[in-house]
Amino acid sequence: MAKPRMQALTSFNCLNLWESGAGLHPLDQGMLALGAAVPDAPEETLADWPLGRRNMALAQLRCASFGPRLLGWTACSRCGEKLEVEFDARLLSDDPPNQGQGLEEPIVVNGRSFRLPTTRDLANAARETDARLAAIRLVESCHLNAEGAPAWTDEDLEQIGQKFALADPLAETRLTLRCPVCENEWEENLDIVSFLWREIEARARKLLFEIHALASAYGWTEADILSLSDRRRTLYLELAQS
């Protein structure tokens, strides 16, 4: 898969994304960010990208706009100890060795053919509150021979999930964590959309503060203030507050 040259989000981009996506489901927020990452792609096709392709584009956007370092916090699943988690987004923004192999070819499991899951499929599955029913809905969305859908067994679901992961390794990133207090080990999913959206929201709120301060001090419009470089805005803020 060719790696596009990603443009960093501008101040206008961050404010518009934050305003448009406030209160939306994370899947929809991811679609908004993806549209900013690849503005030349037809909007209606983005939801049908395989998840690995989506995640790679969002990781590239994250690296270009905010840098590669992902830093977050979680709690031990056993004792509740708070742990800092750090990850390099460049590991998601580059093609893994087998990325792209078989993405266009059907995935065959026990004689049944499937395509890779997409954001549209995840949104469809998210309507289910039961995890197993959600997995079944996801599998059925990707099933290419949908006539007379079979009764899916747990073994079927596990085998299909494993095949999906092998064919599209960037679709899900699992982090193995270890608690320094109780030595418990567990896995958590790294959600690039959540990391990216938190950065967009933080940047938007900072920009709104800067707009308010500079507009109050100098009477400038929002467009005037956003047209300034970050360095100039910072200097004007220092002057206004001195």
Image (tube, helix red, strand yellow):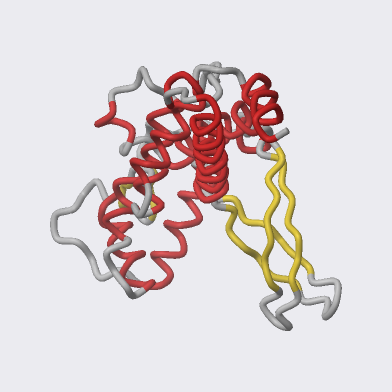
Image location of residue 56, percent across then percent down: 53, 34
For this rendering, which residue is in front, 160 or 96?
A: 96
User: Which residue shows up at 31% across the image and 52% down it?
Assistant: 112
User: Which residue shows up at 33% across the image and 66% down it?
Assistant: 134
As drawn, 167 above or below 188: above
Q: Quadrant of residue 8?
A: top right
Does residue 108 appear to the left or right of 177 in the view shown? Answer: left
Image location of residue 14, percent across then percent down: 47, 33
Q: Quadrant of residue 69?
A: top right
User: Which residue shows up at 57% across the image and 29% down it?
Assistant: 60
Instruction: Please identify the quadrant where the C terminus is shown.
Output: top right
For this rendering, which residue is in front, 152 or 240?
A: 240
Image location of residue 6, percent across then percent down: 54, 20
Q: Quadrant of residue 137?
A: bottom left
Does residue 206 appear to the left or right of 183 in the view shown? Answer: left
All told, the count of numbered labels is 0
Does residue 94 appear to the left or right of 223 in the view shown? Answer: right
For this rendering, which residue is in front, 182 or 28?
A: 28
- Taking the view exactly as shown, the residue that stands out farthest to the left is 147
Does residue 131 appear to the left or right of 174 in the view shown? Answer: left
As drawn, 189 above or below 170: below
User: Which residue shows up at 57% across the image and 48% down it?
Assistant: 195
As drawn, 231 above or below 85: above
Image location of residue 46, percent across then percent down: 33, 33
